[in-house]
Amino acid sequence: MVAEFNARARGIELPDAPATTDAPAAPVELAPLSAPIDTEAAAPVEEEFFPVGQQEQVRVRADLLDRLVNNAGEVAIYRARLEQQLGAFRGAMAELDRTNIRMHDQLRRLDLETEAQIVARYQREHDKQDPTFDPLELDRFSTLQQLSRALAESAADISGLQGVLDDLARQYDSLLQQQSRVSSELQDGLMRARMLPFEGIVPRLRRVLRQAATETHKQVSLQFSGTHGEMDRNVLDRMTAPLEHLLRNSIAHGLETPKERRKAGKPEEGTVHVALRREGSEMVLEVSDDGAGLNRDAIRKRAEQRGLLQPGAVLPDTALDRLILEPGFSTADKVSQLAGRGVGMDVVYNEVRQLGGSLEISSVPGKGATFTLRLPQTLAVSQAVFVQIGETQFAVPVAAVSGIGRISHARFSAGAGSYHYAGEDYPLYNLGHLVGQGAAKAEGQPQVPLLLVRSGDLRAAVAVDQVLGNREIVVKPVGPQIASIPGIYGATITGDGSVVVILDAAPLVRRHLAQPQEPAQQAPVVEQRRVPLVMVVDDSLTMRKVTSRVLERHNFEVTAARDGVEALEKLDERVPDLMLLDIEMPRMDGYELATAMKADPRFKDVPIVMITSRTGDKHRQRAFDIGVQRYLGKPYQELDLMRNVYDLLGIARVRE
């Protein structure tokens, strides 16, 4: 009985039990325990109950999957912070290497000085020297020479420790790369788990269309294309109801009755087509029909009745079509389950906007209407290009960027119409104007960077101040209030913990084109105060850090250079308002740098303050002869330094 119960629990059908008789049961021959198992006979049974190639599926709660995706995103953020800290560690190691080289050079010169002292002492004491001792023996060494040898040994120890730290940094870098690969695979897997095929809601849409056609006594066929594409589960769930309404709308308002279609020379059966495709970082849903199109006369009449439009006002067809998106707007003469309630298109539009998408309407009288919904492909993890406008950083999804271009300041300032790239013309726009944050000027750069955006038939070259590079980002929701603004894709957290808004440039350009700014109504431009830039040039890391912190504490922007060569490289990128310069530096000292700056028309007007330990009159006079405005000795007093900085920049110091 126990064996029968176990067999039936496993789903194995047992032969029917023989009828009960009084005859004794025949003896059953048992196989010996050591008999070999016939694997060939057992294989079919195993394949019957465990089919090869069948994939097991597990049902996972949606909230649990969302939490896992969020945790994977947090792991990516922490990894980015570790990479940033490792980069800072490598920078400190490079500074240590330069300091070590400088210390070895100083020790070499110290050894030369001590050797010279030994030789001089040998010459002085040659006559009275004991011939049994060599002048280079230990008793001839002074304490200074012994200390120089000890310093040389300590410097060698520091070099060894530096090598150990370099090896550890390389190992950490390798581990971070492996962790990055595993983290990316984890995120990709979770994202695939979040994606659902669009064809899963096709039966539901067919049923909705069939019911609407039955109620209106119309003949309709529903066609799909691209339904094999996948969408984010959250996006698909929130767009199912708007799609159902668009289908009902096509039946109630778009398609004619069979009699009217025969009269117009159309087949009695109307067609509604739903297409899904991917364009850049967007999923595009198109719902089109071959009906009569939008009744613009009825739309104008109802808009005038509701006070949305002045009688006789001239509007382009696109603006007139978008009036159906107003709340409570309907052109139906009587209220039914499908039309006339004034609830529908405004709800569809609001849902699309909250997802960060856009809705476009295209209608041709007598031929039909097309509703194009552009939605974000995913709401979790993606690659983004980081750009900067003024002091603010933004992220733009990589899938929406077809390339990076550059244009000269002269062409950009002259209002060049477009930028030619890959055989196409991209009209020029300014990202600062699109986001309402002041125009991008790309000051200090030889050319203006451009983001080349391509979405459907839209082409745009968007000017920015600076392109900071490509990074992997974790998209965080920003709430319905901000997500409803066109062009805001979400937000992300960078490695240093700051929040960066993710922009989708295509909706920003479309909104700019739909709502052109009239010059007469533009608000007066408020000139913003520019923070002065001060360049600190010193080979000492400590002096660079201390001076930079002093200047930043007084609200100055600071850039630093290790020597004159690096300072000239940075001067080509951006010209500072003031230079703080040391004299003794490798590769190019302060005198050479100041001479080169005064000989260059681009830099000759930049004030220079010499801060050095050489306080002699000869050094001071040479600096003034070159054209240096101020000369300070090390260590300097903060009050004295800031007084000279404010005087040279012509800024009145405000006492708090």
Image (cartoon, rainbow, N blue to C red):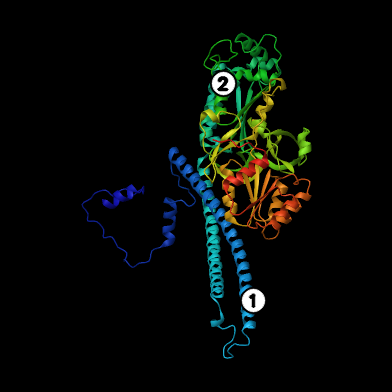
Q: Are marks 1 and 2 in contact (CB under 8 Å)?
A: no
Q: Which residue is mark 2?
A: 346
Q: Does 111 appear above or below 72?
A: below
Q: Which mark is residue 638?
A: none
Image quarter in which the C terminus is found: top right
Q: Residues within 10 Å of mark 2 (few under 14, many from 20)?
A: some
Give residue 448's position: percent from left, percent from top. 72, 40
For residue 15, say whether it is visible.
no
Q: Residue furthest bottom?
A: 132
Q: Mark 1 against mark 2, which lies toward the viewer?
A: 1
Where does residue 466 sit, x and y in percent of width and height?
67, 42
Displayed quadrant of residue 261: top right
Q: Which residue is mark 1?
A: 116
Q: Amino acid at mark 1?
A: Ala
In this view, the residue in front, 252 or 590, is: 590
Q: Nearer the viewer, residue 535 or 12?
A: 535
Q: Give the secondary structure at mark 2.
A: helix
Give residue 277's position: percent from left, percent from top: 63, 36
Which of 485/2 is in front? 485
Name the side, left or right, on which 420 lies relative to 433: right
Three-letter amino acid code at the position of disc 2: Asp
Residue occupying the point 60% across, 46% down? 640
